[in-house]
Amino acid sequence: MPPRRLSPEEREIWARLARSVTPLPGRAVDLAPPEVFTPIDSKPARPAALPPSAERQPPRRAPTPVLDTSWERRITNGTLAPDVTIDLHGHTLDAAHQRLNHALGHSIARGHRVMLVVTGNPRPAHVGPLGHKTRGAIRAEIGDWLALSGHADAIASVRTAHPRHGGKGALYIILRKRG
């Protein structure tokens, strides 16, 4: 991705950050914001000292393949009936991760097809000076948890729930048929 110019809002954030920095003794500080910005998601150049195998792989995401039309219709219309519901809202990240893994294993063993996972609505959060959000941690992590789970091969799709089941605060996990 090519570099882009900073927006006026980003320049203001940079100026606030730069004013908060105290230079090391004997060092001058350039408080001017950079003219161009390289997005974080662009692939950085690998240092020459690192072998290719040491390069960190990006996190995998949970599968979201296209389902057949009957599944799509049921999700869109809100007529999909979850076999089991798990509420992770209000739990710590560790507790939520453990509950999710346990519920996935239980649902797979029982032959369930649809899990409803309540993560809680992503709330409008205060965004700090570096763009860090302070809320919605479970929702932000759940995709990685599912992709890296030992049950990932049993997941056919992950979709945002219909508003009657929680909307953006919940997910449908569609499990594959046991064969």
Image: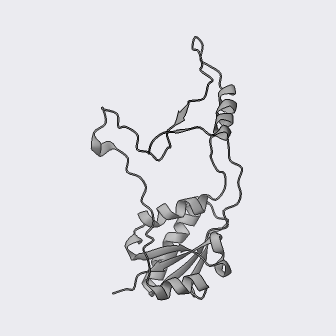
The colour scheme is: one colour
Task: Indicate the position of residue 122 as horizontal and vertical percent values.
Answer: 66, 62
How many numbered tags mark residues here?
Answer: 0
- Judge left or right: residue 76 versus residue 71: right
- Nearest the eye: 91 or 32: 32
Task: Indicate the position of residue 177 as horizontal and vertical percent values.
Answer: 39, 86
Residue drawn at point x = 45 percent, y = 62 percent: 61
Q: Is residue 147 above or below residue 51?
A: below
Can residue 112 be seen in this snapshot? no
| Quarter of the view holding residue 15 | top right
Task: Indicate the position of residue 120 as horizontal and vertical percent values.
Answer: 66, 67
* Quadrant in which the N terminus is drawn: top left
* Quadrant in which the C terminus is drawn: bottom left
- Nearest the eye: 130 or 104: 130
Residue drawn at point x = 61 percent, y = 58 percent: 137
- Judge left or right: residue 46 versus residue 112: left
Task: Indicate the position of residue 58 as horizontal and vertical percent values.
Answer: 41, 52
| Quarter of the view holding residue 118 | bottom right
Can residue 123 be seen in this snapshot? yes
Residue drawn at point x = 66 percent, y = 56 percent: 135
- Judge left or right: residue 122 versus residue 44: right
Q: Is residue 97 above or below residue 156?
A: above
Most distant residue in the top direction: 26
- Nearest the eye: 29 or 106: 29
